[in-house]
Structures are given as structure tokens and as C-alpha cells.
Amino acid sequence: MLPIGDQNPTRTTPFVNYALIAANVLAFAIEYAWIVAQGEGFVVSGYGLVPARIAADPAGEAFTILSSMFMHGGFAHLGGNMLFLWIFGDNVEDALGHLRYLFFYFACGVSAAAAQVLTDTSSHAPMVGASGAIAGVLGAYALLYPRAPVTVINPVPLFWFVFGIFIVLPAWMVIGAWFLVNLSGALSAFGFGATGGTAFFAHMGGFIAGVVLVKPLLSGRHPPDLGRFTSFRRSERGYRVSAGRGIPGPGPGRWDSWR
């Protein structure tokens, strides 16, 4: 279920979210150029987060927690992550404020890294990607704006002629589907010693951190307008807000590494 936008206006300009997106894109450009010059193994293994190495030398490998958060396993991996951050990050930043959002983002990224490492400290597969931190953003968004309308690409092509290519669903349904897919992947991968693929445990760790941290970080802040979206009614093009002050809506990588 691929989202392409939400209809949840912000009160402020999300400068930090824009900067994070720009930093990820710039880092990927540098990473790609470095791979061309030095080779994939040197760059990805050297700066990605490798659970076995960080478990053996936490102080010496701690920098990879940060470096891995800005690396990606290909253009599709980068594009998907930045799309989710673009759609959901601005509202979480609006709720938390700029500095708290920056702290929140990195705290979720660190939590995601810890979850991935702790589930298999013997793994030598490097983890790269902002997915863990962005998972935290999704968790916070689902908690703060569960009924916000999110436009997604209809996941069943057969129904395109009935409901259209794009449908509008509440955020809890879109993010909930993402969560269930990742939870299923994490449960399936547990104990099998996989050597690469999707970092499901990092996603779960980041998501849980986002849910746990967002409310405490709202302390002292003017809360977001949680009553903006009150309910949804079915329409021929999906779901749309039917009450309150909601805004009606219109009808992964090539390397053997975690991402």
C-alpha cells in the first residue's frame, strides 16, 4: 500500500524535515560516487552498521549508527524512504517543534539500530538506510493523527476501474498495514540467521520508539489539533472526512545488506 500524500496541513514550515531529506539525498550521492571509486564492499561494509562488529567493539563502531542512517541500498530504497519522510515527517515536526523533532528522529534511529543488533549480534550483514528512524515517524504520526486522510495507490489493480487508481484511507489503516507487514517479516526472520534483506527488527524498534517517545516530547507544547479528523465515510473513490474540520480528499536495494 504505497502512500503518495496526506491531507494534513501544518502550522509551521518543516525546516528540519526538509534538511533531513536533503542530507539523505546528498549522502547517497556521495555514497554512490564513492562506490564507483572504491568499490561496494569497502563503502557499505565499512560505513554500514554491522551487528557483529559493533557488539565486539561498541566504542570503535559507534559512528556507523549515524553513518548507516544516511546510506541507502539503491535509488528505489532512497526514493521510498524519502517519500514516507516527506509525507509524514512534516506533521510530526509541526507537533513536536523543530529541535525536539530532530532529537526524536535520531533517537528513533538509534533505537532501530539497537533492535537490529540485539536480535542477532553475530550477523555480519551491514545495515543501511533511514528506515528505522522513519519508522519512528510513522509510529508518532499514527498515534497523533490516526484519522488523517492519506492518499494511496489502490493496491488491487483489478479495482482501479471501480474505485480509481488513487484512494483515500485513514492513516491508522495505511500505517497499520505497514506495521503488520513488517511484524510478519520480523517474526518470519527471527532465529533464521538471514544474511541480508529488509531490516524488519530495525523497523519494529524504530516504530516502537516513536510511539513511546512522541507523547513525552509533546510535554509543554501546544498539542496538535487531534479533533481535526473525526470520522470517515465510504465514497466511490475510497474514504473521506465526514465531520469536524478535516479536509476532504480527492476521490528495495541491490546489495546483500539490511535496509
Image (spheres, rainbow, N blue to C red):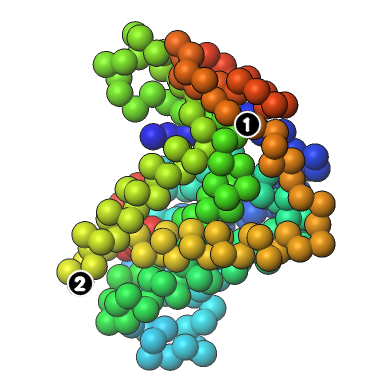
- Which picture quadrant has residue 55? bottom left
- Which picture quadrant has residue 1? top left
* Residue at x 52% of width, y 43% of height: 84
Residue type, mark 2 in image: Gly
Q: Is residue 13 left or right of residue 173?
A: right
Which of the two labelled residues, at mark 1 and mark 2, occupies the earlier sequence position?
Answer: 2
Q: Is residue 81 visible?
A: yes
Q: Position of residue 88 (x, y in %)?
A: 59, 43
Depth order, front residue of 101/19: 101
Query: Dot 1 corresponds to which residue?
Result: 230
Which element type, helix, strand or loop, lies under badge 1? loop
* Residue at x 46% of width, y 43% of height: 175
Residue type, mark 1 in image: Thr
Q: Position of residue 247 (x, y in %)?
A: 67, 23
Which element type, helix, strand or loop, lies under badge 2? loop
As drawn, the label of residue 67 is none
- Which picture quadrant has residue 24? bottom right
Query: Dot 2 corresponds to which residue?
Result: 191
Q: Is residue 218 left or right of residue 66?
A: right
Q: Mark 2: few, some, or many residues within 10 Å (few <14, many ≥20)?
A: few
Q: How many marks?
A: 2
